Amino acid sequence: MPASYARELEVAQLAVQRAAILTKRVFHEKAKGTVSKDDKSPVTIGDFGAQALVIAALKANFPDDEIVAEEEASQLRQDAALRRTIWDLVRTTQLSDPAAEAALGGPIRDEDAMLTFIDFGNSKGGAQGRIWAIDPIDGTKGFLRGGQYAVCLALLVDGEVKVGVLGCPNLPVDDAAPLTGGMESGQTDEGRGSIFSAVLGQGANSRPLTAGALAPAKSISMRAIADITAATFCESVEAGHSSHGDQAKIASILGITNPSVRMDSQAKYASIARGAGDIYLRLPVSATYTEKIWDHAAGDLIVREAGGAVTDIYGKRLDFTIGRTLSGNKGVVAAPVAAHPRVLEAVTEALAKA
């Protein structure tokens, strides 16, 4: 009998909810505490704080599991003021439901423990054992500009994604709401905040993102595309993440005239999984760029469990067995199962002309 992963799912959902509370606190601040990593990409105090909270929950429940996560704490160890700022966020963030908070192991003990938890994300990944992949704030640039972002968590067992959870604080609760790239000026959190989850072989669902116990869930599925010309693309906001020019060619080949919706993060996977969009393309912008596993693991599973197919531009399934990156793949093509072959054909044709 296959494993149900019920406990892993519950812990993952609650951990993402707790981390999302912290990210929302930072999101609504005018100054989001931005710093730069060695590769010059932005990271905020929210990234560090959310990662600490998620890893603390995982270690309390699954102490022997490995963790692949985006951030590490060396910068915080050298910067006392930055460390204290993040610690003040972490120590004051908890779920409002005592039983839910207890299920995550309760609060982190002190600053040193916080740094230790952040650094537990240094696993090399691979094809063996239980490994969690975390992106504490996926879509940091979207987070900074007031757009979409996601708290992402996935469990891989022997290289296969078994559990995926996405917390999307700025996506509407209503699955039928219009698809947008972010929050409009003057909008509040009311009616926004969704959590998406899936277990391999058990389907996908969504529920409102709360500050306490888990809200009731409902099943989600991709919408069938009877006419490919009526489909809607989701694509990255950043041209450095996906080739907008190639996507325009693909739309032309398919006869799609609906404007693409540009949003940051794995919120794109969540949106097409719930039927609020149809096709997600992430097209290579350079021959050397390699995707990270934490940017795709949860979304890949949620889309597939919602009735979609996810491959790279060559039609290969995303391979999470190699390590911390998807070095065996190029790009991402996600679409409903029935439409995926036609979309992939168009991708091949467009890139052949590039």
Image (cartoon, rainbow, N blue to C red):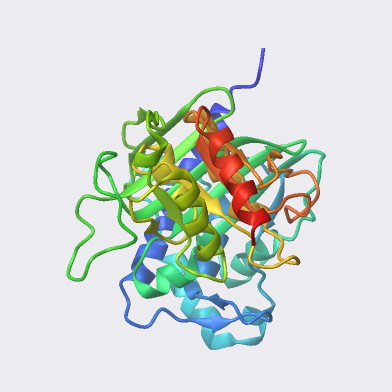
Q: Residue at x 25, y 48 (%)?
A: 178
The residue at 66%/17% (across/down) is: 2
The reply, left or right, for residue 343 in relation to residue 69 is left
Q: In this rendering, is residue 303 above or below 76?
A: above
For residue 311, which quarter of the picture? Answer: top right
Residue 84 placement, left or right of 92: right
In the rendered view, tell whether residue 130 sits above or below residue 338.
Answer: below
Give the residue furthest to the top: 1
- Picture quadrant of residue 345: top right
Q: Residue 7 placed where, x, y %?
A: 55, 31
**Of 331 and 37, the residue lying toward us:** 331
Quadrant location, the C terminus = bottom right
Q: Residue at (62%, 79%) from the top-left corner?
A: 76
Q: Please state if 327 lies on the left or on the right of 263 as rendered.
A: right
Looking at the rendered structure, the number of numbered marks drawn on it comes to 0
Quadrant containing the N terminus is top right
In depth, the one of 204 and 341 nearer the eye is 341
Residue 102 visible in the current orientation: no
> Which of the 4 image quarters holds residue 25?
bottom left
Residue 78 point in image, percent of width and height: 66, 86
Which residue: 55% across, 79% down? 83
Would you say residue 150 is visible in this rendering?
yes
Which x, y percent locates residue 58?
Answer: 60, 47
In the displayed structure, 147 sits above or below 97; it is: below
- The front one of 20 and 240 is 240
Q: Position of residue 139 (x, y in %)?
A: 49, 64
